[in-house]
Image: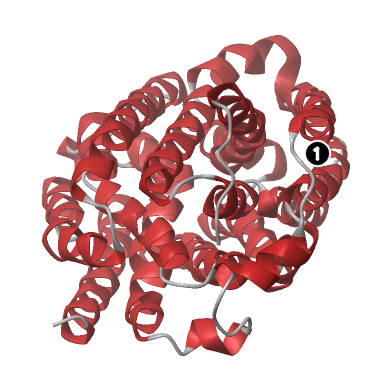
Amino acid sequence: MNKPVLAKSKAITIFLVFALGYFISNLLRAITATISPELVNEFNLTAGELGLLGGGYFLGFASVQIPLGYLLDSKGPRKIVSYFLSLTIIGLILFASAQNLTMLLLSRILIGVGVGACLMGPLTAYRIWYQDQTQQRANSWMLMVGAIGMLSSSLPVQYFLPIIGWRAIFLSLAILTFLSIVLIIIFIPKWDSDRIINESSGDSKLSTVWSNPLFKSLVPMGFFNYGGLFAIQTLWAGPWMVRVSGYTPEESAQGLFLIYFCMLFSFLSWGYFVPRFSKSVSDAVKLLRFGAPINLIVLAIIIYLGPKAGAIHWAIFIVSSIFLSLTQPAVGMAFSLSNAGKALTSFNLLIFIGAFSLQWIIGLIIDLGIGLNFSEINSFKLAMVFVLATSLSSYFYFLVKNK
């Protein structure tokens, strides 16, 4: 397919408009880590319940990925992202008015459904509208925007908590989401699905995606490595700093700010340099072979250090996980244009089911350890050993399948 040559200003406008939606998505993904002390105190939550609540976002997010792929390929990002964000507004209002765990969880799931298109929509658009060599950069800089969202969920949210409370914060985010919808409707181009299908090659079926050898080799890594990364950076890094490292809630928010700032800087740098040495699927596979295990080494060190491992160690863990960001654009480039949305959302499904499962399982393991009379510190370490073991096994599977 001959891709349109966009004017630079048009390409930048498309990126920035989509970036606002993804900023909101990531702020909502990570905000649970900052407000968790408030929720635990107000609703008397256990670690397992907190993990379930945090994971509700990922459950909702994952539940829409397969139909989302078909919708993006046929209807385009302009319609689908704006429609889905409308559900986010409803979820935010319900969360702000919730009076029990059940209502919190249901509204958190709805929020996850609503923001489910905020990255896959843009990545599908970039696959069609941007040249191949710029897709890795666009993907990395979208992840940088996500890091800004997570950054905003830490100290800024902690600052406003005692002033307006967590409920008013969620209502304010509903207003910001409405603004994002308006900008998408105004600035994002319409979708010519017939032209995309006619000019692309390949079998436009979901089975084509799931039977692809590269995709199958990345299934465990998407679930455990990427899912575990999301579970830690959006929730469990915060409770670790409070309950293992001995931070106060304010110090934990500062630690999360440091973690997300390091993420922002690493994705900014990665987006600048990665197109120079990763221009194809095979390049991404080579980089994954050598770079993917680095964060597992860091995680092993954190487990060994226990209470001595604080914000700086988790920041190093997150930054060293940057090689995992190669997987999504590589999956997109491995398929025809008519299958781009299905491929990207299928892989995203794995990531977010993994994030939901691991976020909840980590909490359950912590509760189990405490129930078996382990110390709270050792219970947290046991949960992280589970993440390390499953991620390492997934990496070895990837190596075997990509000799």
Q: Is residue 149 left or right of residue 133?
A: right
Check the image and report above or below for 90 versus 246: below
- Give the camera-side residue of 204 and 106: 204
Name which residue lies at 34% across and 79% down: 214
Report x, y in % for residue 189.
75, 40
Residue 55 seen from this side: yes
Report x, y in % for residue 393.
22, 78
Name which residue lies at 70% across and 61% down: 60
- Give the camera-side residue of 8 and 234: 8
- Mark 1 highlights which residue? 92
Q: Is residue 330 left or right of residue 163?
A: left
Check the image and report above or below for 5 versus 47: above
Q: Secondary structure at mark 1?
A: helix
Q: Residue furthest top?
A: 163
Check the image and report above or below for 298 versus 59: above
What's under tag 1, amino acid-wise?
Leu
Name which residue lies at 74% across and 36% down: 188
Figure label count? 1
**Quadrant of the rendered image containing residue 288:** bottom left
- Give the camera-side residue of 159 and 278: 278
Q: Is residue 84 left or right of residue 144?
A: right
Check the image and report above or below for 334 versus 323: below
> Which quadrant does the C terminus fall into?
bottom left
Report x, y in % for residue 334.
41, 70
Name which residue lies at 58% across and 47% down: 129
Report x, y in % for residue 389.
23, 72
The colour scheme of the drawn protein is secondary structure
> Which quadrant does the N terminus fall into?
bottom right
**Quadrant of the rendered image containing residue 11:** top right
Disc 1: CA contacts within 10 A as few (<14), some (14-19) or many (>=20)? many
